[in-house]
């Protein structure tokens, strides 16, 4: 149980285009999902908390207009990198809390998406 | 604010031996949770073990166990009978009731055959 998927696993795009990354909880409902960014050989940096049916909460320094998050259902959150530039190239990881609704639930992670912006 | 410190960037252990990874944390929360996650070369984050701060008993999961010293704010991970598949980056993490998880910088563990 508690499986999280991400799609795509790898994407290459041209500078100036937008890219959408999907995060799905496959066998449970997730009212809260999280988006992280990881640079090579570095730790995970929390970007935002995605709440089903409401606006995402962004961490300090993360541009909400640049990284659009939508959590339209209990099993799907999407991260759209708008007008991507080479500095946005990174590994993006999502996670979902299980059990949903219970404080201190464990976060289960998707396999990540490697974004390369040319 | 929460902070998590892993002071060992890299460690090596002989296969079948025991290794301990260190972690210290700081939090103003009274209700918090501690985790060890493993990130192998595939980069999939895998939960290794979880500890609720209100529990005094150390969590154990097969060959993995923790030494949770609440007063010292220490949360080390012991891996017994190390196997080649244990080679990975290990992240210590702290979470609160809001479920934000703060990660340490990680310790890369090498298993020597």
Image (tube, rainbow, N blue to C red):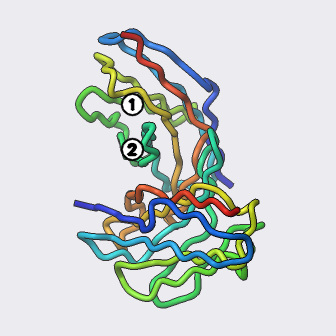
Q: Quadrant of residue B1?
A: bottom right
Q: Secondary structure at mark 1?
A: strand
Q: Compute the Cα span from label 1 to label 2.
A: 8 Å
Name the foreground residue: A14 vs A8: A14
Name the foreground residue: B39 vs A85: A85
Q: Are marks 1 and 2 in contact (CB under 8 Å)?
A: yes
User: Residue visible at 64% across and 74% down?
Assistant: A81
- Residue under pointer 1: B66
User: Residue visible at 40% across and 79% down?
Assistant: A76
Disc ID at residue B51: 2
What is the x, y in percent for residue B13? 43, 13
Q: Sequence order check: which comes first, mark 1 or mark 2?
A: 2
Labels 1 and 2 positioned on one and the same chain: yes
The subunit letter for the residue under badge 2 reads: B
User: Residue visible at 38% across and 46% down?
Assistant: B46
Camera sees residue A48: yes
């Amino acid at each position: 149980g508690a499986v999280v998927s991400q799609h795509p696993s790898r994407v290459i795009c041209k500078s100036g285009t937008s890219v959408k990354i999907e995060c799905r909880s496959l066998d449970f409902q997730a009212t809260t999902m999280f988006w992280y960014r990881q640079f090579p050989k570095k730790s995970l940096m929390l970007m935002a908390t995605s709440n089903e049916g409401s606006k995402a909460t962004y961490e300090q320094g993360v541009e909400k207009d640049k990284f659009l998050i939508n959590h339209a259902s209990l099993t799907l959150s999407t991260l759209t990198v708008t007008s991507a530039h080479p500095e946005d190239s990174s590994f993006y990881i999502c996670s979902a809390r299980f059990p949903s609704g219970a404080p201190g639930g464990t976060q289960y992670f998707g396999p990540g998406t490697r974004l390369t912006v040319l | 604010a929460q902070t998590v410190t892993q002071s060992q960037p890299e460690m090596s252990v002989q296969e079948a031996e025991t290794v301990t990874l260190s972690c210290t944390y700081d939090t103003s929360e009274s209700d918090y949770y501690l985790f060890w996650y493993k990130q192998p070369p595939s980069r999939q984050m895998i939960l290794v073990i979880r500890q609720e701060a209100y529990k005094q008993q150390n969590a154990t999961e097969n060959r993995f166990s923790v030494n949770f010293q609440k007063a010292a704010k220490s949360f080390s991970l012991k891996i017994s009978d190390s196997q080649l598949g244990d080679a990975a980056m290990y992240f210590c993490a702290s979470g609160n009731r809001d479920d934000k998880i703060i990660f340490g910088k990680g310790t890369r563990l090498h298993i020597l055959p």
